[in-house]
Amino acid sequence: MDWKLFFTAFCMLFFAELGDKTQLAVFTLSTQSSNFMPVFLGASAALVVVTFIGVFMGRLVSNYVPIPILHTAAGILFVVMGVMILRSSIPELSKYFRW
């Protein structure tokens, strides 16, 4: 097993999900009951399935598209999504800040 890759994936997902809306949803669900185990198991199973789909699709796409093109496309998509989110939030920000 490639332990470096394992810990890279673990740390990347851990820090990406920390404080994310998924974690807040699980937090909210766990307040609904004194038994946390169903929430823990359900959330863990969902994360495993979503991660499996991501790994499967990544392997499938990488068989047909060269890795440098995937990296470039992912970077461009990340920037475009960031700009779109920023643009959509500017009208909301104008309520709180004067430009």
Image (cartoon, rainbow, N blue to C red):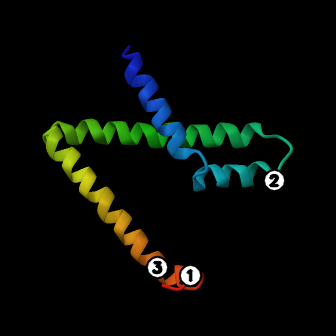
How many residues crowd mark 1 within 10 Å: few (<14), some (14–19), many (20+)? few
Amino acid type, callout 1: Phe
Q: Residue at x 53, y 40 (%)?
A: 15
* Mark 2 or mark 1, whichever is nearer to me: 1
For marks 3 and 2, the one nearer the N-term is 2
Amino acid type, callout 2: Gln
Q: Nearer the viewer, residue 15 or 45?
A: 15
The residue wearing badge 2 is 32
Q: Nearer the viewer, residue 61 or 84?
A: 84
The residue wearing badge 1 is 97
Q: Residue at x 54, y 45 (%)?
A: 17
The residue wearing badge 3 is 90
Q: Mark 3 and mark 2: span between their CA atoms?
A: 35 Å
Q: Vertical placement of 37 versus 71: above or below?
A: above
Q: Vertical placement of 3 versus 17: above or below?
A: above
Q: Position of residue 76 (x, y in %)?
A: 24, 57
Labels 2 & 1 near each other (Cβ < 8 A): no
Labels 3 & 1 near each other (Cβ < 8 A): no
Q: Dot 3 lies on which element? A: helix
Q: Dot 1 lies on which element? A: loop
Q: Dot 2 lies on which element? A: loop
Amino acid type, callout 3: Ile
